[in-house]
Each structure stands twice: as C-alpha cells, then as structure tokens.
Image: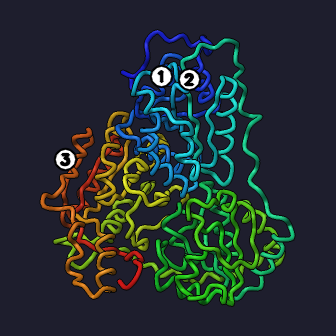
Amino acid sequence: MKADEKPARIDPTAGPRWGSDVAAAMLRRTGIKYVALNPGASYRGFHDSLVNFLGNEEPTMLLCLHEDHVISIPHGYAKATGEPMAAVVHSNVGLMHGLMGIFNAWCDRMPMLVIGATGPVEPQKRRPWIDWIHTAKDQGALLRAYTKWDDEPRSPEGIVEAFLRAFQATRSEPKAPVYICLDAGLQEKALERPIAIPSPERYSPAATPHAPQEVVARVADLLATADNPLLLVGRSSLRQEDWDRRVALAELSGASVLTSIKERACFPTDHPLSAAAPFFWVGPRGKEVAREADLIVSLDWPDLNGFLQQFTDNPDALAARIVHVSLDSQLHNGWSMDYFGLPPVDVPVAAGADVFVAQLLPELQSRLSGRRRWQGETRNPAKEPAYSDDSANSIAPRDVEAALAKARGDLQVTLAHVTIGWAGDAYHFREPLDFLGHDGGAGLAAGPGITIGAALALKDSGRIVVGILGDGDFMQGATALWTAARYGIPALFVVSNNRSNFNDELHQEAVARVRNRPVENRWIGQRIDGPALDHAGLARAQGVDAEGPVTTVPELEAAIARGLAHVRHGRPYLIDALVKPGYANPPLSRGKS
C-alpha cells in the first residue's frame, strides 16, 4: 500500500455494519490480495467498506484511470499466478468500458472476480436522471455469454453466498471470469441482524477431473506403438512439476512437440524435441512435422481443428490417430465462436491436460519397461539469434526479440506480452514463468495492463517482467502506466513501433489483390504517422521514465540495458523502438495475400 493511502482512525476490531461491509469482508476471507478499480458512485458504499472497514488492506486497492486497465491488470495477475484478483467497475457504463477486457480473459481462460454495481434497485431511492440511466434490470446480460457465472444478490446472506460461489467457480477448471453486481441500495443498507462470514475452506473448488483408467491405457498403447507421435501442448499450468512431466512424456514417448505463442510457456523451446518455434500460425516446419505424424496428442490445444486445417484440406481424412484432452467444452455456448471448429478425434479425453499427463506417464513407463524412446537426436531447427543485415541503421521486428535474448543473460525474465508477429526462434522459454501468452481475445489495449498485472504478481519474486507491445495496443492502453508509476510496479515496456495498424494493411492488400485493385494504397487510413506519436513522452506524462524513439539495434541494446537497470531498482521504464513495417511471422489473411 502507498503510505499516503493508509486510512486514518480505523477500528480493526469492528464487525460489519452495512451491506457493503459484508461484500468487503468476503473479499478478505476468500484471500483476494488486490482490487483494481476506477471509482463510481454506484459502488460508493463498497468503496467506503474497502477503505473505512478493511483499512485498504487485504485487499489493497489499485486506482486505475480506465476500466480497460481495471480488467487487464487482474488478467495479467492471473496469468502469472493462476489465481484471481478482483476488478471493480462502476455501474453499467463502467462495465461496458471493461467488456472487451473481460472477453479477453474469457478467451484466455483466466480466473477473475469482477464486481459491479447497479441501482438503487428500489425506484424510490433513485436520484432523478443519473441513478435511472445507471440502473439496469439485468446487468449480467451484458457479459453472461463470456463469463462463467454471474449473480445480483438481494440480501446480505445472498452477498455471502454470491462471493463463495463466485470464488469457487472462477478457480475451478476450466477457469474463467465471474461477475457479481451489487445493488447500491443493499450496499448502503444497515445490517438488521448479525451476518456470519464463513471460512472458504468448505467451499473450495473440486479437484480437476481425471480420465478413466481405460482411456489412459488406450492412449498409452497408442503412444507406445506410434512411429512418429506428436504432442500439441496448449493450455498448461504454471507448476514446475507439471512442466517436468510434459518433458518426461515427450522424452519417454519420443514425440515431437509443437507449442503456441498464444499460450503460456509450457515446454522448453530449446529442447531437442521442440520441433518448431512456438507460433501463432503454423509455418513450413510445423506443417512438415504435423504431416509426418501418425499420432497427434492434443493437450488442451485451443483450436485443434484450425491447426489441422493449416496443413490439410480435409482433417477428417487424416491417417493419423488423434487424441484430444480438454475440459473446455464445459464453457462453450452459442454466442461466441471461441470454441473453434469441431475437430475429428479418435480418443476424446474429458480431463485436465496436466492431470492426464500425470496419469499417463506411469502407464507409458510400464508399456516401455522404463526405456526412453527418444535417443537424444535433435529435431529443433532453432538457430543462434542474429540481427538483420541492416541492424546498424534500422530495427527489423525480429531484432527486438534477438536484442532481448542477448540482454537477458542469466536474468530471470518473464515475458508478459509479445506482438502478433513474434518470431519465437530467437528468445527461448525454459521455465513456466518465462512467457505468459497472448491476450486471449485479440482485443487491443490489453498489453500494458497485462504487463502491469504480471509485474504486480511477481514484484518480490526476483523476476523481471517485460512486455513487448505494438504501437496501436500501447496507445489504447497507455494510461495503465500511471498505475504502475503510482504503486511502484516495476516492468519494462518495449513498444515495437511500426507507425501503422500493419495487420490491417495486409488485410487491405489481400482485398485489393482479390479485386484486382492497387495494393500500394493499402496504407491509407492505417498509418499512425504525420504527426508521429510521442510514446516516450506519453509514458513520461504518466510518471514513467522512458526514452525513444530508438532507431538502430545498437541504440536498442543500450536502451534495454538502461531499462533493465531501472526495473531492477523497482521502477517501470518504457522504450519506443521504431521498427520497419513487417512481421517476423506474417499473420494469416483471408483471401490472397
């Protein structure tokens, strides 16, 4: 807590007296450490309870300048811990600001407790105009399609149960955000009777489901007899023991491994069995490995059918046997297509992926009598990181990755975010916290807040948190940096600045080619230039030290060294790196590209 945010005259022995005190007490009892918020009158009672009942401790408030950051900071925190933070948004209007971030966290399957407010529900308590437009009959309808559960409790006892159920639901696999809407009238109503605040231990999530033993045995048989097995490692836990089991499974089975840059680090990318750099879209090497596989085991790969479609026109005609381990179907609904295409699967496994690997390993060891099928050969095509030919005079997108790999050395670094065109072959992931994945729903403005949330979670861990941001993403989320400056949250932000909405330039080029129109016009309405944006100046305006634009790789190396030094001393820092338009790995585009 900031010293100047310590409340005066707090009685730590006082019990709850108001409806909102019950909600605050439940946050503390469930172990929530931080609450991100942007203030609003709809939850003024709850805000008072956080300050004057709890003393702004356990949880501590983090003031944000926009609801985008109220959501993206807890999103980043969850990515680094696997545990939820609370996010508080004002009425329907604040919630609508934060909806995109909630969708991001939903697609990313991250836990989060979102708390909103409405009302007063009783009409006679509403002020003219303002309380009417900030009251909704069913506020949860705004986000019900992309949250796991929501509630609007009508009594103090209902508040207790809502928080217990929300905390249980968001932490159960598969994880996702939950929402509680607090009636302003109920918040500000004095308690008429004592309210019991139960211990959360008896309301813990159930254990992640295991697979039936006959299914485990069948998959073990397939892996033991396959000539060219392939593991697709998708959504995974942060636990080191789970990481070690994935490595052991690959080595025991002799399987090649492919990973996604959309998901957290899940397998060492410099391991000899890592057969291609982690990717957004499958490149030539990944397609080659996939075509040669006679068994594909998907460990909660989010878009399995989309993966298959990138190397075959007819996934159903593939000769390879396919195993798909996932609980994700429990969250699927008809509103969002984030369930992706329906893949052809020979062995569907409704279990947690890491739980299944733990079940599978001893079965496979028994089949192979403990003999490892992998004989030590390398299938990893990664090369030593090298700069572009003109790096003395300019910065190519991949140069940012290579420079960071060089600067990293022996430091423990957590990459909280990277750009869409990240190459993946220059900077290796060797531990679970080395990389936290993408933003889930591809909604801009998330990168800065996700980086700050991760840095908050890892503040005392000895790890340095770095976020690589596109210029469009940074500009939409720039004011999140004020929260990092305000609360001393150290992180290094590197803006990979191509002065364009470049992904959309490629889309405009694709359309122009299909329609036989001039592709040289693709930049119109896309370039972020003339005037050029002052990203470093904007960061400094939020209280964050910054420099740039740097325009050559030697300048970038020096800037990264200065930035890492700032972060090691507990301060955030931003570098504006002017990069040439382009992508190390071009994204897919509909139509001809």
Label 3 to label 1, Cα distance in Å?
Answer: 43 Å
User: Residue at point 84% right, 65% down?
Assistant: 212
| Kind of residue at disc 3 | Gly
Q: Is residue 361 left or right of residue 531?
A: right
User: Residue at point 63% right, 14% down?
Assistant: 191
Q: Position of residue 501 (x, y in %)?
A: 28, 65
Which tag, 2 or 3, sits closer to the chain's start?
2
User: Residue at point 24% right, 75% down?
Assistant: 522
| Kind of residue at disc 2 | Glu
Q: Are marks 1 and 2 in contact (CB under 8 Å)?
A: yes
Mark 1, residue position: 126
Secondary element under disc 2, as helix, strand or loop, is: loop
Q: For mark 3, does the 10 Å Cα neighbourhood hold few (<14), some (14 to 19), or many (20 or more) residues?
A: some
| Kind of residue at disc 1 | Arg
Secondary element under disc 1, as helix, strand or loop, is: loop
Mark 2, residue position: 122
Mark 3, residue position: 537
Quadrant where the image shows the C terminus: bottom left
Q: Is residue 37 left or right of residue 155?
A: left
Viewer-nearest residue: 555 or 307: 307
Instruction: Using the image, determine if residue 54 lies above or below residue 206.
Output: above
Secondary element under disc 3, as helix, strand or loop, is: helix
Q: Position of residue 372 (x, y in %)?
A: 72, 78
Q: Position of residue 294 (x, y in %)?
A: 68, 87
Instruction: Using the image, determine if residue 174 lies above or below residue 521.
Output: above
